[in-house]
Image (cartoon, rainbow, N blue to C red):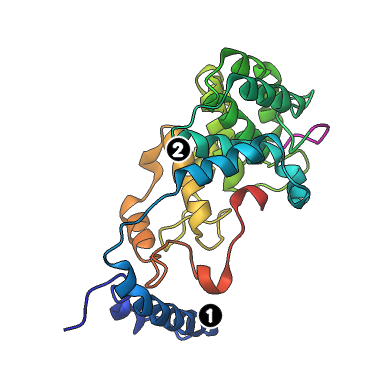
């Protein structure tokens, strides 16, 4: 009898999938992964999974105060980098020194745009993605002075300018609109207390996000676009934060999510091995 592993859980459903080139490439890649996996399985079975916390902490604390030049390509994602590192250290139960926290507060304050929101770096235009990263980082620092740097009045005005007549939100003034914008904006408003104070900020947003759910059950970037794992997270989270989880067709969503789990990698990204996908924050 064949062993039941994550590699053969989905094989029965493979027979009903259309044999597109992408699926054929996926199957070929899975076969290579399975071969390598089983070759190493006997070496792994008696070893517990280990997380090298000290190595991770050392890496993160070094990068938190001094990024090397190899990170230049992420110049417009600086608040994101701060958030990812601070969040990782928090998960590793590492206490960031107060001096470093103060430096982070000062740095994030320098990325705040004079008209509201945060940019990807000092003197850059405001954008919802780095605004999300900056606000989350400031919250994680657990300092009163960190939250005080956020200009909530200008932030609310900026969010109003981003909202479109159909309820969607632009990622930045003159930029694109998709469910990333809705999620980032709603999350930031929730964290800063603006969601309860200014319910008009998101007039029509829940209805617009609900229209992004496809016949498959997942959510696309906009109404009428195919479902995608990253956008599905953004859409479902935004609706829950807005108190409109009742807009979600949960049976269809669960069906879609369950069928996105790939046989080899065990993750939920559509065709991740053969297609790949950059982080939401950098898209």
Q: Quadrant of residue 67?
A: top right
Name which of mark 2 and mark 1 comes first in the sequence.
Answer: 1
Look at mark 1 in the image and give the residue it sits on.
22
Magenta region, main secondary structure: loop
Locate the N terminus and report the quarter of the image it occupies: bottom left
Look at mark 2 in the image and give the residue it sits on.
92
What mark, if any, has residue 238 been given in the picture? none
Residue ID at (70%, 43%)? 77
Of tags 2 and 1, which is closer to the observer? Answer: 2
Return the residue nearer the eye: 154 or 67.
67
Q: Which residues are magenta?
A: 122-127
Q: Is residue 36 above or below residue 260?
A: below
Residue ID at (77%, 26%)? 110
Does residue 218 appear to the left or right of 121 in the view shown? left
Picture coordinates of residue 89 (x, y %)?
51, 36
Q: Is residue 232 above or below residue 20?
A: above
Magenta residue check for 226: no
Picture coordinates of residue 12 (x, y %)?
28, 80
Does residue 261 appear to the left or right of 208 in the view shown? left
Q: Is residue 175 above or below residue 186?
A: below
Local SS, label 1: helix
Local SS, label 2: loop
């Amino acid at each position: 009898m064949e062993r039941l592993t994550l590699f053969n859980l989905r094989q029965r459903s493979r027979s009903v999938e259309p044999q597109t080139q992408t699926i054929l490439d996926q199957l070929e890649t899975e076969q290579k992964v399975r071969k390598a996996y089983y070759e190493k399985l006997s070496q792994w079975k008696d070893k517990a999974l280990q997380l090298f916390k000290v190595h991770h902490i050392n890496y993160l604390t070094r990068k938190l105060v001094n990024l090397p030049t190899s990170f230049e390509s992420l110049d417009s994602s600086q608040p994101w980098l701060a958030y990812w590192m601070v969040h990782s250290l928090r998960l590793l139960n590492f206490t960031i020194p107060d001096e470093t926290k103060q430096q982070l507060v000062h740095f994030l304050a320098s990325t705040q745009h004079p008209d509201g929101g945060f940019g990807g770096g000092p003197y850059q235009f405001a954008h919802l993605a780095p605004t999300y990263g900056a606000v989350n980082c400031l919250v994680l620092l657990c300092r009163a002075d960190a939250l005080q740097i956020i200009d909530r009045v200008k932030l609310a005005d900026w969010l109003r300018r981003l909202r479109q007549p159909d309820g969607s939100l632009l990622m930045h003034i003159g930029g694109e609109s998709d469910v990333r914008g809705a999620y980032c904006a709603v999350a930031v408003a929730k964290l800063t207390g603006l969601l309860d104070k200014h319910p008009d900020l998101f007039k029509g947003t829940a209805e617009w996000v609900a229209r992004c759910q496809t016949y498959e059950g997942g959510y696309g970037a906009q109404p009428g676009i195919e479902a995608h794992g990253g956008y599905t997270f953004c859409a479902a989270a935004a609706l829950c934060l807005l108190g409109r989880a009742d807009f979600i067709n949960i049976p269809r969503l669960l069906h879609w999510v369950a069928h996105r789990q790939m046989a080899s990698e065990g993750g939920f990204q559509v065709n991740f091995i053969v297609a790949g996908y950059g982080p939401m924050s950098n898209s």
